[in-house]
Amino acid sequence: MSKIDRRFIVILLLISTVLTLFFTYRKMDYNVDEVWTFGLANNIGSICPDIEFGKKYSGEGFYKDFMEVSPENTFNYGNVLSNQANDVHPPLYYFFIHTICSIFKDSYSLWYGIAVNIFWMFLIIPILYLLGKELTHDSRKTFGFILAYTTSMAFMDTVLLIRMYAQFTFFTILLAYLFKKYWDKTLDKGFYPAYFVITILGMLSHYYFVIFLFFISLAFGIHLILEKKYKELRNCILTACGSAVVYLLLWHHIFNHIFRGGRGRQALSSAASIDVTSIIFAIIAIISLAVVIKMGKEKYTYSTALLLCGLLYVLVVLKVAPFYSFRYWMPIVFIPFYLVFDIVDSIIVNRTKTSYRKYVSFSVFLLINIISFAALGFHTSKDFYSREYEKLLSNIEGKDCIFYIEEDWEALCYFVPAQKASSYIFVNPDTLDLVKDMDESYIFSTRYENLDKIEINKDMKPIYNPQYALQYYEVNH
């Protein structure tokens, strides 16, 4: 790696770090799954909080025991494995969260989660730069593409969401780099161990990694067939099978998650059904195969293979995901960023005569990124910021709250509002009568889908009603 490449990487790391710190300081809310991340990593005996319904809480309340590591349970990785066996995800990311929480026991901070993601960010950028150089053979273009990507809303959402998606992104990029590095080379003894380890660690990060793994391995296998490298193809297949066996020995709970868990059964049912997405997937798969055959080995480039892998990944995730969320596409967003930047940059450089034309594309993407952040008040989209919600939190401050939930996990939706309230009580269908007997004023809230099940017979004034989210009411007497 040249000195200019090392300098570019340092610049990219500095810019990304500054942006991450800026948006972390401005983070005002937590997705329910972010709160759950800490509970899954640290809570003893259950993946849901232990709530005493009808009890008046204040401050951290039961959230403290759920999210923090007590001195007697530091570095308790057996509990992490147990929790993840009862959840729907593999355990690797939660090991990292539990480790940092064990170091800072008896405390909680969003910075613990962000620190883990910054660690992955510091690995993502150098590997992505190496991949970019392999793709473009141009330091300037590689720097521009990664600058556009790492200053985008998509990347900041990836780093600031306290879930495993930054880690997932790293292993996706690392695998993409490995295949590109060996695309036009003989597979040596360094390839197979790397493929083996990346496969296992990627699947220990998120089950959807196997989707990208399948398509990019298939694309690489087709390339080996076109090159008539049958021995190398055989060795790749054996390596993949070996990694699958080792993975199952390490994490056999995947069977329960897929075949017995609610998410797994839902994904299998969705995959087996035929709908518009299925038809589109089939059409694109057939066209892709025809294009590869038509192109031949001379024109079947790695960029083409990577684009097809990204597209097919998106379609499969659309088919099997439990709900539509950008988080599932975070690991492959670098692909469209690379392709779009490459096209825009080529057009600008080839069709303009200004001496600054090589840097115009940088400015275009940076301007787009700044506008996207400005539109959200310089918050990330996953922060779910809005002026109305900010006003609600201000309104809750110092007041008593009652939160109606039907399942224990729903209490995690109220982590931030609960910290603002003077006191808060959780009620469920069995304890709802406690609300009916209260005479003092309070803030009442529940999830949108619970509204038609509640009959309080109180004068409830709506104060925050985003569609399909938490509904808040002011109850006065």
Image (cartoon, rainbow, N blue to C red):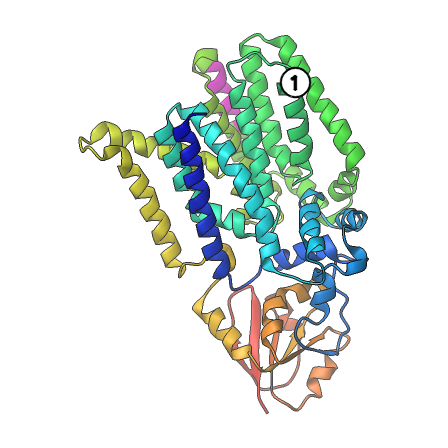
Measuring 69% from the left and 38% from the top, which residue is drawn there? 204
Categorize mark 1 by other alpha carbons within 10 Å: few (<14), some (14-19), many (20+): many
Q: Residue at x 66, y 37 (%)?
A: 272
Q: Residue at x 71, y 63 (%)?
A: 106
Q: Amino acid at mark 1?
A: Cys
Q: Which residues are magenta?
A: 285-294
Where in the figure is residue 148, as x and y percent of width and height? 39, 41
Q: Quadrant of residue 58?
A: bottom right
- Towards the viewer: 138 or 293: 138
In magenta segment, residue 86: no
Apparent side of residue 307 relative to residue 211 in the rendered image (left or right) = left
On the image, which quarter does residue 49 sit in? Answer: bottom right
Q: Is residue 184 above or below residue 142?
A: above
Q: Which is nearer the eye, 328 or 93?
A: 93
Q: Is residue 229 left or right of residue 404?
A: left
Where the C terminus falls, by quadrant?
bottom right
- Give the percent coordinates (x, y) of residue 311: 50, 33
Residue shown at 53% from the left, 29% from the top: 309
Q: Residue lying at the far left in this picture: please name it.
A: 353
